[in-house]
Amino acid sequence: MKKHAFFALALIGAAPAPKPASAPIPSPGEIVAAAPARDWSAIAPSDVLVMDLAPDVKGKPRRVVIQLMPPPFSQGWIGNIRKLAAAHWWDGTSVNRVQDNYVVQWGDVTEKKPLPVGLAVVGEGDYLADIVYVESGGGSGLPLFVQSTMRSGDRYAQKTAFWLGWPIGIETKTKYSLGATERRMHREPIRPARFDTFWPTHCYGMVGVGRNLSPDTGTGAELYTVIGHAPRHLDRNIALVGRVIEGIEHLSSLPRGTGALGFYETAEERVPIISARLGSEMETDKSPPRYEYLSTESASFAKYADARANRRDPFFIKPAGGADICNIPVPVRRVKP
Amino acid sequence: MKKHAFFALALIGAAPAPKPASAPIPSPGEIVAAAPARDWSAIAPSDVLVMDLAPDVKGKPRRVVIQLMPPPFSQGWIGNIRKLAAAHWWDGTSVNRVQDNYVVQWGDVTEKKPLPVGLAVVGEGDYLADIVYVESGGGSGLPLFVQSTMRSGDRYAQKTAFWLGWPIGIETKTKYSLGATERRMHREPIRPARFDTFWPTHCYGMVGVGRNLSPDTGTGAELYTVIGHAPRHLDRNIALVGRVIEGIEHLSSLPRGTGALGFYETAEERVPIISARLGSEMETDKSPPRYEYLSTESASFAKYADARANRRDPFFIKPAGGADICNIPVPVRRVKP
């Protein structure tokens, strides 16, 4: 299996690959594995949505775990999602659409199931986060991991960055200066910044809110996740509310729907959702889910992002010199409660 | 199903969506559907590899069709692939690895099956295409669809373009000038260019050659296809030889392997390959496969690429103003023989 094992070295976040004795340069996966405990941030149980699909044909359970985004992102829809979960609203609904290289979508296929009362109607303005000004220098500044402008690298935003563990696009109206750091070849965490608007980006595994034509913005009852190349053209056009942090394979490996847009054409194809619960409601369980993400403000993340952009582990001949925002997935790990 | 149908409008290449009476601006899919016959280019049967997997659990056939790249790309490996197909070498091998958001890999899991004699050993230099100089103006120039430098948009190459139907990265050593066209907001086909090296890019569905550590470059017997966000860091590090043009869902929806790097751990999980044949060998069949791609040098492609970058169909509120090279999939269609 030599050929396989070596091709393997091209990969990240996988099981440890055989380490050549002469290779001192760690892979992205090795950097993550070596990150100290202080570089990991706990994900609050109330920010976790646990969705159990019906078991597969062999009876194996299929659990999909979603992390909801923190403020200031999409909190109107996320508030609705908390209400929907508390009402056990998704129980008995289903996965209804699987379109290759695009999205998996779930919710009430009949569109007749009454929604809980009191859901918010959220405006399109909330596809973007509020204007944020960050003071230069000092501990009060907003920590922000901005990707280098070398190969200035994004067709969908003036700038991309990671913030509070999430990939974001940034559009600035007032010119801002980030100092010499930004002009350096390699990415590193910087503090001073000033910008006008930012928004989460449609990377693989991100979870968004289905909607009708504008000005409708969706309630959060109809959700989708990305299972292909990042459809970044959806950024700022639909609300993103979170990302799948465990079990995405239970969605991404579902048979593609043969109807228009990947909708399943028969009831038998749809995958029943047994339940969807906030992690905080599962606290009395034997095994409440507990996760951590690698803080995007940490030194380990800076090293990891640099290694993703400049692969120097043995498999690679030519480091790319860059990586797009969706090719630097934020590491998430399960931890014991 | 209103909610579904409308969300649908965000998509491309799918079945026709309901067309609002007041929407004169065509979607990318509508532009492709309206492209005249002259804008489509036939794919030669000898450039098509037809791989039949064992039928699925319900007995449904699973055919995967791959288009091989034309010169000057990767011809050493592609020559080997033609020999392997002619020798029916893949018959009885299997799909052995499915790693979520990365690749599906197939070939001889035992690594003991003798290879046909006379396979070429291809050098790493062939990960890039030869230096090409294109004369300015006139009909003799190389037609090339270069993406605008607005939001200059790529972290993996100085420039990206489409050429002969394929997405490529370009690195230039000698400064070249592309004239005013390039500075315009929207993409359009231009002719004059001069560059040093170019290479195909790892977009969704692209097919590449597994290899051992450098200087090994693989033979072409062990192949993989991309089933997730474009792993562009592999560009220039592994040979790309083609792309899946039909049936990728038979690979992308396979259960993910639970072994390291997504390898299947048991023989039962592996998916048998019944046969792999060049289209040219199937000419005596009742239904030899025939395909066309939308010429990337055509006016229709220019319109399509612009529409992918600036969605103006009714679902969208904010056109992105750009699209990365892997978010403009080259349209391919099946045609009657």
Image: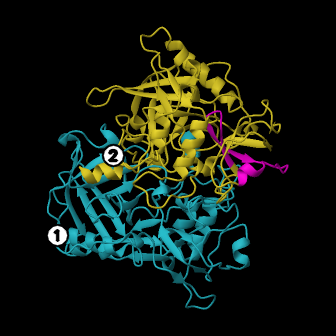
Chain colours: A yellow, B cyan
Q: Name the residue under label 1.
A: B116
Counting from the top left corner in percent of width and height, residue B91 is at 17, 60
Q: Which residue lies furthest to the right in this view?
A: A174
Q: Position of B119 compared to B173: left or right?
A: left
The reply to whether callout 1 and callout 2 are in contact (CB within 8 Å) is: no
Tally of numbered discs? 2
Q: Residue A179 colored magenta? A: yes
Q: Name the residue under label 2.
A: B98
Which is more toward the observer, A24 or B96? A24
Amino acid type, label 2: Val
Which is more toward the observer, B178 or A101? B178
| Location of residue B190 (image quadrant) | bottom right
Which span is picked out in magenta? A160-183
In percent of the image, x 80 and y 33: which residue is there? A138
Q: Can residue B16 be seen in this view?
A: yes
Counting from the top left corner in percent of width and height, residue B70 is at 39, 76
Mark 2, residues whose alpha carbon is within 10 Å: few (<14), some, or many (≥20)? many
Q: Which residue lies furthest to the top in this view?
A: A284
Q: Residue B214 colored magenta? A: no
Q: In which quarter of the image is the C terminus of chain B?
A: bottom left
Q: Which chain carries label 2?
A: B
In percent of the image, x 63 and y 87: which residue is there? B136
Q: Distance between the residues labelled 1 and 2?
A: 26 Å
Counting from the top left corner in percent of width and height, residue A222 is at 55, 33
Q: Position of A127 compared to B122: left or right?
A: right
| Location of residue A194 (image quadrant) | top right
Which structural element holds mark 1? loop
Amino acid type, label 1: Pro
Q: Mark 1 lies on which chain?
A: B
In percent of the image, x 33 and y 46: which residue is there? B98
Counting from the top left corner in percent of width and height, residue A152 is at 67, 58
